Amino acid sequence: MKLLTAVTIAVILPLAGAQLEAQQIVAPASTGQKSLAATMNVYVFPSQGQTPEQQNSDEATCYDWAEKNTGTDPFKLQQQSQEQKQQAQQDAAAASMAGTGAGAVGAVRGAAAGTLIGAIAGDTGAGALYGAAAGLLIGHRRHRIAQEQAEAQVQASSAQAQQATAQELTDFKKAFSVCLEAKNYMVKY
């Protein structure tokens, strides 16, 4: 019985140790911090049984390599993206003010034109009143058109900037992934 127990222990302990080792490689202890790849939504699997420490080292090496080869730093891109959004909001606020005062200017111009027409027709007051009303409507219409054009321009430039930033990030992820794949990791983003 003692021999059977000794054999069982001799067989089970190495298997249990191997199982624990496999668990450590597959599911490393969570430190509450994301890996470098995870912060960029890049999924990396150590296909050759690399340790978490080795994976972190390889990710850092590949990050540096990708940054040098693409000229892009994703963390700076994230900051740049935030700045672009703030600028777009400021530009949108400025665009909403485009053409401000056009109604008043139109009313003054319309009143002047209406006064001239009214003088010819014999009633300057009525002509000025009708001219001011028409000028006000035309001025508001110009304001609305100017505002719509300015807002469309802001949206187009903002979309273009966001698209360029997204392309830079995609290029970085490709370079980062190629480097990690060369180091025997499976990578998806």
Image (cartoon, rainbow, N blue to C red):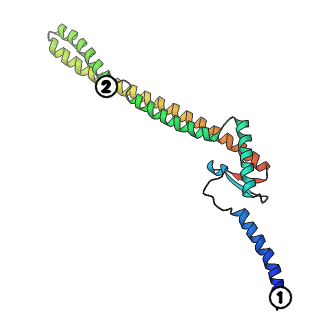
Which of the labelled discs sits on residue 140, or is there none? 2
- Viewer-nearest residue: 69 or 30: 30
Residue 152 to residue 22: above or below: above
Horizontal placement of 102 versus 124: left or right? Answer: right
Kindly tell me whether residue 45 is visible in this rendering.
yes
Horizontal placement of 113 versus 5: left or right? Answer: left
Residue at the far top: name it: 120
Q: Position of residue 30 (x, y in %)?
A: 63, 60
Q: CA distance from mark 2 to mark 1?
A: 97 Å
Residue 156 to residue 36: above or below: above
Residue located at (72% from left, 48% from top): 59
Q: Position of residue 53 (x, y in %)?
A: 73, 55
Residue 178 to residue 68: above or below: below
- Viewer-nearest residue: 164 or 119: 164
The residue type indicated by label 1 comes to Leu
Within 10 Å of disc 2 (Cα), the crowding (few <14, some 14-19, many 20+) is: many
Q: Position of residue 121 (x, y in %)?
A: 17, 10
Q: Position of residue 57 (x, y in %)?
A: 74, 50
Q: Secondary structure at mark 1?
A: helix
Quadrant location of residue 74?
Answer: top right
Within 10 Å of disc 1 (Cα), the crowding (few <14, some 14-19, many 20+) is: few
| Image quarter (top left, top right, bottom left or bottom right) of the N terminus | bottom right
Kindly tell me whether residue 189 is visible in this rendering.
no
Residue at the far bottom: name it: 1
Q: Secondary structure at mark 2?
A: helix
Which of the labelled discs sits on residue 4, or is there none? 1
Front tag of 2 and 1: 1
- State the count of labels: 2
Residue located at (27% from left, 14% from top): 109
